[in-house]
Image: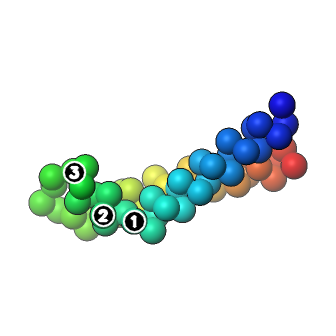
Amino acid sequence: MKVVIITIIVIIMAICVMAIYDARKIGEKFFSSPDKNRVTKMIKLIGFIILVMCGIIFCFIK
């Protein structure tokens, strides 16, 4: 059970890193907002917050 939870957390962390890296592409593809910088900043912020939460959970589980 512990291995499955760790695997899921690592996958979520990898997705968050990809979201932070490709935030501008994701923002252009899924949102038609004229303010692309604001959308990009929000995607990066949400990805970072989820990444930190998963990292904390990963440290406590391991």
Badge 2 crowding class, 10 Å Cα cut-off, few under 14, some 14 to 19, many 20 or more, is few
* Residue labelled with disc 3: 31
Residue pointed to by mark 2 = 25
Question: In what element is the residue under mark 1?
Answer: loop
Mark 2 or mark 3: whose residue is earlier in sequence: 2
Q: Specify few, some or many for label 3: CA neighbours under 10 Å numbering under 14, 14-19, or 20 or more.
A: few
In this view, the residue in front, 8 or 46, is 8
Return the x and y of residue 9 as percentages of the image width and height: 68, 45
The picture quadrant where one finds residue 40 is: bottom left
- How far apart in space, not on screen, are marks 2 and 3 (Cα)? 10 Å
Residue at x 68% of width, y 51% of height = 10
Rendering coords of residue 39 (x, y %): 28, 58
Q: Is residue 24 above or below residue 2?
A: below
Label pair 1/3, CB-CB below 8 angstroms? no
Q: Quadrant of residue 21?
A: bottom left
**Residue 22 - label:** 1
